[in-house]
Image: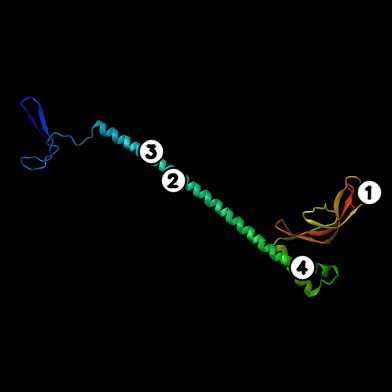
Amino acid sequence: MTEHEGESGFVFKDKRKIDPETGEVRNAAEEGVDISAPSEGTAANADAAASDSEALIGMEIATLREDVQRIQAEYANYRKRVERDRSVARDNAIADVLTALLPVLDDMQRAREHNEFTGALKALGEAVEAVATRFGLETYGAADEPFDPAVHEALTHTTADDAGEHPVTVVSGVYQVGYRHAGRVLRPARVGVEDRAVGDPA
């Protein structure tokens, strides 16, 4: 950079990068310009920009972390829902097969009651019953248990002579056992019921 003093005493600084007389590029170091260190204002601006950049990056990281956590939670819920639906579908399929087997199990029970459950029929019947039990089939229905209309189907209803004013209704006899699977009633127990005095076993 060159300086020229005019007649009025003013100093003019030539900041042109190319020397108009020689056409050469002027060297900033030769002109007395310190390019090695930024000014205080420039350093402050750089620090502020770096701080803003760090804050912005921190916000973006926090947002991404929240997105990842939300996606993980949604995926976990999806997996639980799929597993639950798969389990329900499996239970329903098993229940359908077991329901189809109930008439066969009834026939075997009648054969047992008439002492006809012997030989090859006994071996085959026990194998079928074992498979049904392995897949969760349960039988229920017994005399003297409390009557529950949700699991029992009352075919007869009597009242004991000493039932009193506030009797309890119990199963007096079982005409056909009930079946259930995984807590679901496949067929209610067909029973006779009787109103009895509280505490009267029979």
Q: Is residue 134 above or below residue 56?
A: below
Which residue has dot 3 on it? 55
| Colour setup of the view | rainbow
Answer with mark 1 or mark 2, whichever residue precedes in sequence.
2
* Mark 2 touches mark 3? (CB < 8 Å): no
Image: 180 above or below 56: below
Q: Identify which amino acid the numbered label 3 is placed on.
A: Ala
User: Residue furthest toward the bottom?
Assistant: 120
How far across and how far down the image is residue 156, in percent?
87, 58
- Kindly report the distance in space between the C-alpha atoms of the residues bearing marks 3 and 4: 74 Å
Give the residue pinned by disc 1.
Answer: 162
Kind of residue indicated by mark 4:
Pro
User: In what quadrant of the picture does the N terminus appear?
Assistant: top left
Neighbor class of circle 1 (other Cα within 10 Å; few <14, some 14-19, many 20+) is: few
Amino acid type of the residue tagged 2 in the rendering: Leu
Residue lying at 55% horizontally and 53% vertically, measured from the top left: 78
Q: Quadrant of residue 4?
A: top left
Give the residue displayed 80% in from the left and 74% down from the top: 119
Name the N-terminal-most of marks 2 and 3. 3
